[in-house]
Image (spheres, rainbow, N blue to C red):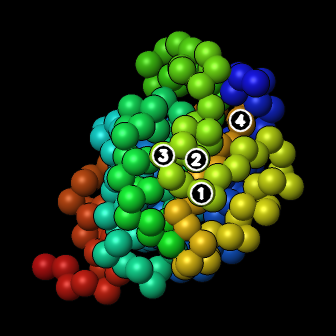
Amino acid sequence: MSASTGTLDRRAAVNALLADRGELLVISGLGSSSYDVFDAGEHPGNFYLWGAMGGAAMVGLGLALAQPKRPVLVITGDGEQLMGIGSLLTIATKQPGNLSIAVLDNGHFGETGMQPSHSGLGARLEVIADGAGIGNVCEIADMAGIEKFRTSLRDLGGGPRLARIRIAAGEVERALPPRDGTYLKNRFRGHLGFKVS
């Protein structure tokens, strides 16, 4: 089944995931994922990765290991996760119970011109994650699935978990979060309770 058949509205899906977020720390992948997270509501617990394609899951892993008493959610796209596919192997070996990964999969490389991605050509990220050793995986194609996944996000012991969320392809108006890396770093560190000079 191709991700290109997804029908979920990406903004509605992300808004639902982040509703009532509580202590959830959120790492967003480059481009549209960051726009979606920002559109759902600016929050000091959001860390937007502007240009680190392939790095979102690994940043999420580092944060989950450093903050084991806080739930961590990575929200990224299929193209970005495919670029960092090896990260799933490392995450599986470390088994952070507080880490969740939501892959917004439209089957395209949205940031470079909507070329079909590997998932659009048949690769299934949830199957790859399961094969890597991430035992808690699912494919989501409707809002009921989003709500079910959202209820697991605060669980500090059930991860790592990965959901491939089958969203519709298409352009969505950009909602641009802050782009100043120093500001974002200091704001996030302050949110975690670290002294920021």
Q: Is residue 47 visible?
A: no
What residue appears at the point 54 percent right and 20 percent down from the top-left corner? 117
Side of 7 where 17 appears, left or right: left
The Cα–Cα distance between marks 4 and 2, rounded to whole angstroms, is 21 Å
Type of amino acid at the residue the image marks with label 3 = Ala
For the C terminus, the image quarter is bottom left
Q: Position of residue 119 (x, y in %)?
A: 59, 25
Residue drawn at x 25%, y 70% as measured from the top left? 186
Q: Secondary structure at mark 2?
A: helix
Residue at figure coordinates x 45%, y 32% from the top left: 82
Three-letter code, disc 1 = Gly
Tell me where residue 106 appears, x and y as whole percent: 65, 29
How packed mark 4 is, by other alpha carbons closer than 10 Å (few <14, some 14-19, many 20 or more), is: many
Check if mark 1's residue and mark 2's residue have beta carbons within 8 Å.
yes
Mark 3 element type = helix
Cβ–Cβ under 8 Å for marks 4 and 1: no
Does residue 134 appear in the picture of this structure? yes
User: On the image, numbered disc 3 is attached to which residue?
Assistant: 132
Residue placed most toward the observer, 197 or 158: 158
**Front: mark 4 or 1:** 1
Read off the residue under disc 2.
Answer: 130
Mark 4 vs mark 2: give the one in front: 2
Residue annotated with mark 1: 135
Q: CA distance from mark 1 to mark 2?
A: 5 Å
Counting labels gives 4
What mark, if any, has residue 167 been given in the picture? 4
Q: Element type at marker 1?
A: loop
Q: Earlier in the sequence, mark 3 or mark 4?
A: 3
Question: Mark 3 or mark 4: which is in front?
Answer: 3
